[in-house]
């Protein structure tokens, strides 16, 4: 086990380094100049002032030198300095990351739980009206644009019914503490978490259904029926457990991408996470901040992939921990 984890960590470091270098050059190749953006926001278009900004932030140095300095900083856990925010990138991300983890973690649990539940129900009653209803509902949520679902949820539950707050992380100026603060954050979390979770729920439901129907046709399931096991026991202990392997794979891949992929949800609901921070950094040409978000998101994808490999062993002990 230790050898497996050590080899995977080594591979993850190599992959992360390649991602850092690739993102560095891709962002530098994009149109726009952060020095020009900052000068424009300051109301100064003088070329001398722009040149001073480039020199101050090291943008006048050769590209390979900028890359070396950046990679060296990341190796010492320094993500650099934000041009626009005038703050360390690490602090900006650390301030926003808990909100994103709360949102994406809640959405992940909702999507996986409901997806497996509805997928199992559809597979057990394949061909019935409930199977058709679940399949159609999953297709609707998968095909509908995420921002449209978010806006409709706000109109229905916030504007029309006035059940839930429509935006933000907490009630501004309320000063809640303790349980009241937890309930306030939870109320603000419901709509964005459900909106993001329902999209991925559709994928898990369809995959669970297809996988369970495939496993149900295998010989060992026929043997279990021949032994007289109850249908519920066969579905839970034999069909569902073996059908979860592809679902676990997909969930592990999507768990990491959720961290940096909630840009639309965070923007619509004004949720103060790193997805919205990344969007603002892109508009402001804040290279270091944008790269910092990419590095953190990529690292979390790699971590979740490693966790997925370990969970495989729990779901099916027959799988060898081969590197």
Image (cartoon, helix red, strand yellow):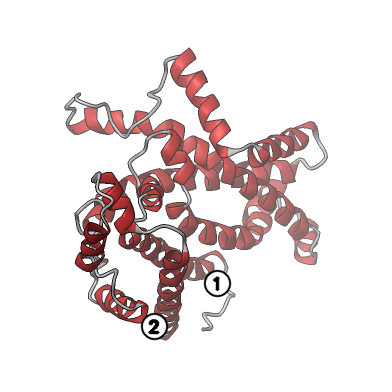
Q: What residue would you read off at disc 1?
A: 317
Quarter holding residue 32: bottom left
**Position in image of residue 11 (x %, y %):** 45, 81
Quick one: label 1 or label 2, which is nearer the N terminus? 2
**Position in image of residue 297 (x %, y %):** 41, 61
* Res 227 seen here: no
Front residue of 249 and 62: 62
Q: Quadrant of the N terminus?
A: bottom left
On the picture, is 109 further left or further right than 200? left
* Crowd band around label 2 with a 10 angstrom C-alpha radius: few (<14), some (14–19), many (20+): few
The residue shown at (42%, 15%) is 162
How far, Cα to Cα, is label 1 from label 2?
20 Å
Question: Which disc number belongs to residue 6?
Answer: 2
The residue shown at (54%, 35%) is 147
**Position in image of residue 239 (x %, y %):** 69, 56
Disc 2 is placed on an element classified as: helix
* Crowd band around label 1 with a 10 angstrom C-alpha radius: few (<14), some (14–19), many (20+): few
Front residue of 165 and 18: 18
The residue shown at (18%, 33%) is 178
On the picture, is 40 further left or further right than 152? left
Disc 1 versus disc 2: nearer the observer: 2
On the picture, is 109 further left or further right than 188? right
* Res 291 seen here: yes
Quarter holding residue 180: top left
Quarter holding residue 302: bottom left
Question: Which disc number belongs to residue 144?
Answer: none
**Position in image of residue 80 (x %, y %):** 25, 66
Front residue of 131 and 44: 44
């Amino acid at each position: 086990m230790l050898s497996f984890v050590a080899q995977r960590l080594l591979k993850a470091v190599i992959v992360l380094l390649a991602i850092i270098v690739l993102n560095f050059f891709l962002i530098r190749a994009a149109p726009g100049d952060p020095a020009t953006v900052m000068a424009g926001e300051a109301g100064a278009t003088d070329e001398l002032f722009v040149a001073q900004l480039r020199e101050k932030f090291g943008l006048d140095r050769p590209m390979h030198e900028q890359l070396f300095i950046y990679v060296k900083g990341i190796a010492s856990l320094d993500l650099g300095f934000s041009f626009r925010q005038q703050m360390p990138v690490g602090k900006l991300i650390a301030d926003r990351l808990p909100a994103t983890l709360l949102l994406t973690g809640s959405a992940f649990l909702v999507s996986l739980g409901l997806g497996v539940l509805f997928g199992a129900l559809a597979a057990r009653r394949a061909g019935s009206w409930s199977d058709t209803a679940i399949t159609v509902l999953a297709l609707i949520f998968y095909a509908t644009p995420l921002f449209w679902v978010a806006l409709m949820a706000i109109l229905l539950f916030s504007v029309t019914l006035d059940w839930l707050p429509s935006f933000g992380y907490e009630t501004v100026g309320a000063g809640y503490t303790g349980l009241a603060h937890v309930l306030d954050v939870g109320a603000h979390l419901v709509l964005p978490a459900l909106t993001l979770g329902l999209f991925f729920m559709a994928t898990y439901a369809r995959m669970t259904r297809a996988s369970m129907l495939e496993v149900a046709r295998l010989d060992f399931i026929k043997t279990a029926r021949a032994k007289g096991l109850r249908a519920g026991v066969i579905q839970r202990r034999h069909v569902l457990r073996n059908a979860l392997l592809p679902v676990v794979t997909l969930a592990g891949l999507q768990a990491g991408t959720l961290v940096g992929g909630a840009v639309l949800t965070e923007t619509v609901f004004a949720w103060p996470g790193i997805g919205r921070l990344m969007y603002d950094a892109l508009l402001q040409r804040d290279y270091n901040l944008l790269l910092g978000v990419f590095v953190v998101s990529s690292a979390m994808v790699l971590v979740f992939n490693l966790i997925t490999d370990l969970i495989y062993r729990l779901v099916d002990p027959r799988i060898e921990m081969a590197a």
